[in-house]
Amino acid sequence: MKIHLSRRYSFAASHRLHNPRLSAEQNQRLYGKCNNPYGHGHNYVVEVTVSGRVDPATGMVAHLGKLDEFVAREVLETFDHKNLNEEIATFRERVPTTENLCIEIYNRLRDFPGARLERVRLEETSLNTFEYSGERQGSR
């Protein structure tokens, strides 16, 4: 029997959507107000879903304390109150869209030892939510 466990966390970060390979006009047209030279911030909510078998000894699919420690170390301490463009190496070369941030968080959590990472869901605003479940064979 396999069961899923989802846990929510939050962090605040700022970013500027800007592609240095595009002109100022192209960036403005593509990213609009999100291309503000001074950036802007979000209070992100990240939902991490893991799965596995229920351990008969503990009755749990994953130890919540260990999951919390792992997410804190790999995600919250890394991204909370940071400027993604300037302080996160990954985003010095990649536009820090929430899609790319969701993928980056997934990759950082992929090796959680207590259960299988199923997906990462990242809420940027009450209107924008992104979800990533890793690469699948034949995906684009």
Image (cartoon, rainbow, N blue to C red):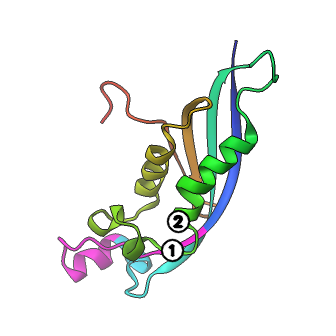
Callout 2: helix, strand or loop?
helix
Callout 1: helix, strand or loop?
strand
- Location of residue 93 by image quarter: bottom left
Q: Find the distance from the CA under tag 2 to the CA under tag 1.
A: 5 Å
Look at the image and give the residue range highlighted in magenta.
12-30
Q: Nearer the viewer, residue 131 or 127?
A: 131
Decide if residue 102 is in sight here.
yes
- Location of residue 89 by image quarter: bottom left
User: Which residue is denoted by mark 1 in the rendering?
Assistant: 82
Q: Residue at x 54, y 76 (%)?
A: 41
Q: Is residue 1 left or right of residue 32?
A: right
Q: Is residue 24 magenta?
A: yes
Q: How many marks?
A: 2
Q: Is residue 122 left or right of residue 110?
A: right
Q: Position of residue 4 (x, y in %)?
A: 68, 28
User: Which residue is denoted by mark 2 in the rendering?
Assistant: 79
Q: Position of residue 26 (x, y in %)?
A: 23, 75
Compared with 34, 101 (above or below) is above
**Quarter of the image with the C terminus in it:** top left
Badges 2 and 1: C-beta atoms under 8 Å apart?
yes
